[in-house]
Image (cartoon, coloured by chain):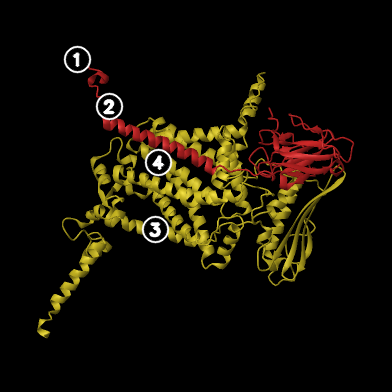
Amino acid sequence: MLKSVNLQEFRQKTWRAMDGRVRSLTAGLGLHELRNLMRGDPPGEKPNPRYKVHTTSFLFHIRPRYYEAGSTILTHTFRLGFFTSFFFFVELFTGLILMLYYTPSPEKAYTSILELANNVPYGQMLRDIHRLGAEGMVIFTFLHMLRTYFTGSYKKERTFTWLTGVVLLGITLFLSFSGYLLPWDQLAYWAVTVGTSMADAAPLFGNEVNLLLRGAPDIAANGLLRFYLLHVVLLPLAAILVISIHYYKVSREHGISLPARMEEGDVPPEVKKAAKQRIDYIPDLITNEVYYVALGLLFLVLGVTIFGYHAPLESIANPQVTPLDTKAPWYFWWLQGMLKIDPAAMLENLLARFGIVIELGTYLNSKVIMGIIFPTILAIVLIMLPYIDRNPHRSLYKRPWAVGIGVFAVLVLVVLSYMGTPQFGIEMEPAQRIIQDMTPQEGEGPLDRVPFHELQAGSYEVNAVQPVNMCPNLDYGCPEFEDFFRLFSDRVNRAIQAGDLPAETQALTVIEDWQQDLKKLTLRIVWPEEGKTKSYERVDYMHTERGSE
Amino acid sequence: MAKETPPSQEEKKPVSRREFLNFAWLASLGFLSLSVAGMSYLFAMPRFKEGEFGGMYTVGTVADLPETGSAPENYPKVKFWLSNTDQGALAIYKVCTHLGCLYNWVNQENKFICPCHGSQFTSEGQYIQGPAPRSLDRFVMQIVDPASGEVLAQTDESGDPLPIPDDPAAIVRVDTGARIQGEPHG
């Protein structure tokens, strides 16, 4: 009996059996080959089994077999497209989990977010990552587009890829925007009201689009459900489809562009050859990608933990009250900034100087021009860019106009975005502005960030009390309250110096012990105007367990 | 140079049975798609209910109106501000003509100010400044005789303020279904 057991043979058989199972799972890579991959060694079998994976495996068949060495230089692409899709997958994954606890109805949406944040293990963290990933996706989509523009990579055989990229930019913005409404807080409700109202300005179909989106004249249960379905079904499906087309072109048709300096003009043949050298996806590029995925996940986790990024949540949506400083999501600020410009009025004023009086404003108001016509032109220019820019060169030095226009466009975008913030061009009483900046109606201001124990009952008047040593009876003083009070005093004094407030202005911070563990905070500015005394104040309550309300 | 024959004369192929049927199928599918698009549009378009916002709303009697020249009163459920000015009374739609925010009455400045983009309007809803393209929209207001139910006066087509009669018992009501667009400013 024992004689028949040949250990050597048994081990070989076991090995072969295991190797066979592994090969069927890895689309042809055996155990030795996997080890070679991990070590970065050349393939151990002939023909190269690594290429076969790309034809046998579904997931690998959409990945490239190789990239040209020149196109993998970090400073050429910065891996922006890679990270954009990385964030998209993060969104898919976290979004699916978040759906477990979310109910898209006005009665339950807000409480389900509270439940998620307070009563679900890792709920707040997942929501934060989902939100941070969304911001990341918008930022990286935009940067990816800028990179493609400046390296001239949209030219020649890549025109169609650029077109799908522009579509993806739109889908990304709408994905992010549709998710904005779902928490059903004041921020969400009014940002989306403002955003959808921009569609209202479109001639002929604007009102219909708005009704279709909102499901009613204003946003309510129907609107929330529609935005939810757009966010979790329609737009992700569209994104997956267009991303696949976009990526297929890159991986299977034309690859990533080479830097212009390795392709254009008098390039020494050895440089050209080195640039065209193939770097295989398996094992080199995939190793790199695993590393970048780890880096991206580290960034997200650190972002929501150590760096303290939190998805904002304000008080529950109130369709009756528009909070002060309502603004669209930041990536639409440029649009909101544009809406503050009235080109028709500007043209009228210009013509009036030459004695020509026309009334353009009756036909073309700022909403139509800046909210619809201009963005439409912008979208068309972006889509048509490869056909408008006929310059065959890709090198930055040979396309001064394109570079100039690109830099100019980015600057304009930044300036318009600044103009879109509520601090720009919205007339508000100075007293109201100061108090709104100290403790905004929604969200957190400097006063709300002062720790509870530093709030000592008392009445602190600007200029009568100096922001030093304000709490002598506390062992460690109250540095953060002093910082707040210094800021408040500075703002009031600057307003007085600028003449916005009269010199007799009184500005007060009043702190009262209201109940056990609850303090009442009052900011009040009193000033004389036309013989009358005017005042503006805001009252906040702060609980020891919680931020201010 | 040899003359090239235009492609039309090259070879005129007759429509085959398969080609005809393919076109027929495609055309019918195209028509079906159009119908489905139309149906989806009608399906997704919201419907309005009578009786809520959109119907006739009775404010009260003339005596109940805010004093002439005082701050406008807010009627949140039916979405208007009731303003009683020297020229008469107005029911002003409470949504800003700019981007749909709800503006507020700021007593200290004696005007409506929108918190979103800073458009400003007088107590009569007249545009003062800001990005709004036109003055505020108004609803048709009616003065009704309490005894006979006869409409004594009604806001005219231009939406101007409605002079209030002396009779304190006359009933004031607002048709929130009849909105008059504000005047665009030049």
Q: Identity of the amino acid at label 4?
A: Thr
Q: Identity of the amino acid at label 1?
A: Ala
User: Tag 2 or tag 1, which sits nearer the N-term?
Assistant: 1
- The residue sitting at 75% across, 49% down in the picture is A431
Label 4 lies in what chain?
A
What residue is pinned by disc 3? Answer: A293
What residue is pinned by disc 2? Answer: B15
User: Tag 4 or tag 3, which sits nearer the N-term?
Assistant: 4
Q: Is residue A10 left or right of residue A318?
A: left
- Image label count: 4
Q: Residues within 10 Å of mark 1 (few under 14, many from 20)?
A: few
Q: Identity of the amino acid at label 2?
A: Val
Image quarter for residue A113? bottom right
Label 3 lies in what chain?
A
User: Do dots 1 and 2 share one subunit?
Assistant: yes
Q: Is residue B14 above or below residue A23?
A: above
Which chain, by letter, is yellow? A
